[in-house]
């Protein structure tokens, strides 16, 4: 069985914290990313894990760095 690569809850917490620290509302960030506020809310509530392309856009916009470890 494959091991989950991403932890949706950790990603959601990081996105929410960085968004707030940078002064974005869910609405303003969603607009800049070209997604709906509802989808942004679902990402922050860990209901949806964005596609890799969208995740990269979010991380770039919020200056979130990604570290990968291999076990």
Image (cartoon, rainbow, N blue to C red):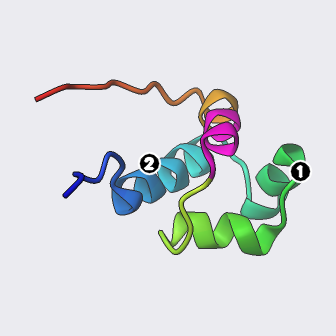
**Near-viewer residue (29 or 53):** 53
Q: CA distance from mark 2 to mark 1?
A: 20 Å
Q: Mark 2 highlights which residue?
A: 14
Taking depth in this image into account, of 67 and 21 the one nearest to the observer is 67
Say which quadrant the N terminus sits in. Answer: bottom left
Q: Which residue is mark 1?
A: 34
Total numbered labels placed on residues in the image: 2
Q: Position of residue 15 (x, y in %)?
A: 53, 49
Q: Are marks 2 and 1 in contact (CB under 8 Å)?
A: no
Tell which of 33 and 20 is nearer to you: 33
What residue sits 61% from the left and 48% below the top?
19
Name the spot of residue 65 as percent of width and height, x first.
46, 24
Mark 1 burial class by Cα count in 10 Å: few <14, some 14-19, many 20+: few
Magenta region, residue range: 51-58
Quadrant holding the C terminus: top left
Q: Earlier in the sequence, mark 2 or mark 1?
A: 2
Q: Residue 52 colored magenta?
A: yes
Against 58, residue 13 (above or below) is: below
The quadrant where residue 40 appears: bottom right
**In the image, residue 59 lies at what x, y percent?**
59, 34
Task: Report the residue at 43% width, 51% height from top.
Answer: 11
Q: Secondary structure at mark 1?
A: loop
Q: Which x, y percent locates residue 39?
A: 72, 69
């Amino acid at each position: 069985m494959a091991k989950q690569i991403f932890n949706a809850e950790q990603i959601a917490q990081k996105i929410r914290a960085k968004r707030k620290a940078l002064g974005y509302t869910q609405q303003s960030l969603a607009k800049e990313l070209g997604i709906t506020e509802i989808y942004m809310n679902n990402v922050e509530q860990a209901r949806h894990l964005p596609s890799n392309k969208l995740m990269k856009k979010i991380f770039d916009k919020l200056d979130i760095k990604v570290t990968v470890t291999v076990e």
